[in-house]
Amino acid sequence: MAAVVERVDGCVGSLDSDSGSPRQCSPPPEQPHQNNPLLALPIVAIENILHFLSYDEISLLRAVCKRMDTICQRILNQGFLKVERYHSLCQRQVKAQLPRRESERRNHSLARHADILAAVETRLSLLNMTFMKYVDSSLCCFIPGKVIDEIYRVLRYVNSTRAPQRAHEVLQELRDISSMAMEYFDEKIVPILKKKLPGADLSGRLIGSTPVAGPSTSLTTMSLLAKNTPSRSEMTKVQQQVKVNGTSMTVLRREMTEIRVKQLEQQKQLQDQEQKLQEQTQVIGEQSARLAELEHKLRELMDSSAAAPPGPLHQRRRVLCCGRHVCRGVGKQQWVLSLHRA
């Protein structure tokens, strides 16, 4: 009776019960491209063909073989970098059209575009912190290709729509799939990748072995423990702290903008008050000159009436009436002058 055995190199063969030698094994799975015309093409040609597919479909093709896995990993990594550059380009174009004042930005037609792009930037930062550490170490690729497709969909929607929906409505699908991808990566894949990090085996052997008694034993253990990578909770705390700091900075910038606006308004009011003060000073000067002229006329009338001989009664009454009118005019001018001074 033959039993199936698996060799270390991955070949599968059958072992006879009589003889202890295995039979001829099947060809290794690394060489299917020799009989497949598609996989026999150059890598550049295969990449150009795969670019007609979505990133989600490319991520599913990684299970075909090792050659296809390598090509798809490269395309996924390049896709994440390309979508980051495309987002930066879109954000620069929108910011160039927005006014500088925060109060004017809220009522601008591109306000929702800016909100959506800012939310996408936050999501890209989270994905970068979660995946790119291990991607740069060549331990894995950017696995969730569907997230790249969704980010492209949101960016194209923002560029092609004049009045987009609110940010939480547009980004609902992106938040859901990216959150699920990051949680699965942290819970299922990161523990495996941490063992493959450079120096992980050495630190594991040093920590797991029985330490030799000596004064530096505790120090060595503490230094090795301190080199461990941060946990998910620590990363979450750091992200929350960064978010809180960003919110506080936004509030401070808004307050500074409001203070500057109030300062400009007060300066304008001071200029208006100075102009009004100059006008009132000019009016007071004119009234003072007129008052002096009326007082001079009154004195002349009083002197002429006192020096003139007694004449008819109607002439005396006429002089007295003129004096009364002049006195009334002088009193009115003094009353106006007192009001201006008050």
Image (spheres, rainbow, N blue to C red):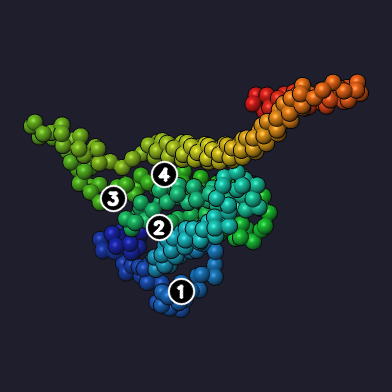
The answer to whether mark 4 and mark 1 are in CB contact below 8 A is no
**Among the 4 quarters of the image, the one containing residue 153:** bottom right
Numbered circle sitting on residue 46: 1
User: CA separation, marks 4 and 2?
Assistant: 14 Å
- The answer to whether residue 216 is left or right of residue 182 is left
**Among the 4 quarters of the image, the one containing residue 2:** bottom left
Callout 1, which amino acid? Ile
Mark 2, residue position: 141
Callout 3, which amino acid? Leu
Secondary structure of the residue carrying tag 2 is: loop
Give the percent coordinates (x, y) of residue 285.
Answer: 64, 35
Secondary structure of the residue carrying tag 3 is: loop
Give the percent coordinates (x, y) of residue 289.
Answer: 67, 34
User: CA separation, marks 2 and 3?
Assistant: 14 Å
- Mark 3 neighbour class, 10 Å CA radius: few under 14, some 14 to 19, many 20 or more: some
Quadrant, the N terminus: bottom left
Mark 3, residue position: 197
Callout 4, which amino acid? Asp
Name the one closer to the observer, 174 or 94: 94
Which of marks 3 and 1 precedes in the sequence? 1
Name the one closer to the observer, 175 or 289: 289
Secondary structure of the residue carrying tag 1 is: helix
- Mark 1 neighbour class, 10 Å CA radius: few under 14, some 14 to 19, many 20 or more: some
**Among the 4 quarters of the image, the one containing residue 336:** top right
Residue at screen point 36% across, 39% down: 231
- Mark 4 neighbour class, 10 Å CA radius: few under 14, some 14 to 19, many 20 or more: some
Give the percent coordinates (x, y) of residue 134.
Answer: 35, 52
Mark 4, residue position: 186
